[in-house]
Image: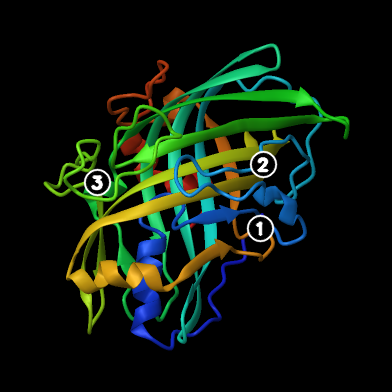
Amino acid sequence: MERTERRQVSLSSLAISVWAALALVSACGGDGGSTPDAAAPSLDGPAAPDCGAPVIDDSIAAPTCTSKPVVPGVTDLSGTWVARVTAAQVVTAPIVGVMHNQYVLTMLVTLTQTGTEIVADGRNCDRLQINEPNAAAPVVLPEKWAHTETPVHRTASFAVGAEGYPIFHLRADTEIVGAQLSSPAECLPTKSDDPAVYDQDKDDKPGITVVVKGQSLAGTICAVQSQTTAVNAIAVSANRLEGDLHFASQQNVLESDPDTLGQLYSLGTTTADPTLCNSGFVMVRIADAQAVDAGAGVDGGASVGCDWVRANQAALFGP
C-alpha cells in the first residue's frame, strides 16, 4: 500500500516539536480534520464546531488508498480481525515552519455480519506516534497510555456500490479520551478539576499523559480529546481490507509540566496532511489458533488477546 511517510521537512526550532506533541496527544491530534489525499478536499465535511464532536463526511465512496485492486467474490467478513489506523497531520507553528506526524492505532475486533450489516466489537490494543527523524523534542506515548485497552463497538456495512463491488464502510463514530461525557456533543473539559475528567491511563494524572523528550525542553502534557473516524475500504484478498481513513479531532490541554508546554499549544495550527495516502486503514483477518498466548481475549468471544496483537504486529502488517 502506498503509505509514503513525510520525513523531508527539517526541524528549525524546538517550539514546533512541542506544538507537534500537543497536536498528537491521542489518536488523531489537534483540532481539524483529515482526508487520505489532497484530491478530495470535500471529505473534510462541514467545519467543526467550537466544541463537541468533530464533524467529518460519512458518505460511502470507493477508496483511493489500496495496494491492490479489489478481489471479487468476498462477501462475508465475519471473524476476528486486527485493524491498523494511520492518521497523518501537518503541524504549522508561527515563524518556525511545518512538521508532519503520524499516529498509528491498532485494534482487535470481532466482526459479526448479518446480510450487509456488520457489528464490530473489540479493544484498542496499541498506540504509536511517529515523529520526524530529527525532532528536537520527540513525543513519546508512555506504555501506560500506549497499551491502555479501551473498548471498541462500531457498526459498519459491506454492500455492493455503484462500482460493482462491496465497500466496507465503518460508519462515523466519536471516541472521548480522558473524560466521561453524557454525549459526544458535549464540550470537552478545559480544567483538570472538572468532574468529567478522569485518569484514563491510570498514571495518577488527569486525562491522558504524553511525554516530550527534548534536550532543551522536556516534560509532560495532560489532555482530553474527542476524535471522530470513518473508513471506506475494499477486500484486496479474502483476509485483508485496505482503504481510506477520514478523521477529525479536538483536544484541550488540562495541564503541563512545565507550564510553557501548555502555553505553546495556542501558537500553532493543525491541518490534514495533503499527501496521498499518508493516512489510511488496513485490516487483516486472523484465526484464533494463531495465538500462542491468547491473553484475556477480545470482546465478542475470540480467544486472541491484545498481548498477542502487540507481539505480532510486524508479522501482520510489516515494520
Relative to residue 90, is residue 184 drawn left or right? left
Q: How many marks?
A: 3
Find residue 57 and name its label: 2
Q: Which one is in front, 100 or 84?
A: 100
Quarter where residue 267 is shown: bottom left
Query: Residue at image x 57%, y 67%?
Result: 5
Identify which amino acid the numbered label 3 is placed on.
Answer: Gly
Judge whether residue 42 can be spotted in this image. yes
Going from N to C along the chain, the mark reached first, 1 or 3, is 3
Q: Which residue is mark 1?
A: 277
- Of the residues tagged 1 and 3, which is closer to the observer? 3
Going from N to C along the chain, the mark reached first, 1 or 2, is 2
Number of residues whose C-alpha sits closer than 10 Å to that of mark 2, classed few (under 14), some (14–19) or many (20 or more): some
Q: Which one is in front, 302 or 224?
A: 224
Q: Which residue is mark 3?
A: 207
Q: Is residue 39 above or below residue 138?
A: above
- Of the residues tagged 1 and 2, which is closer to the observer? 2
x then y, percent, for residue 255: 21, 59
Query: Residue at image x 38%, y 86%?
Result: 13
The furthest residue to the left:
204
x then y, percent, for residue 204: 11, 46
Mark 1 in CB contact with mark 2 (< 8 angstroms) = no
Relative to residue 6, is residue 131 drawn left or right? left
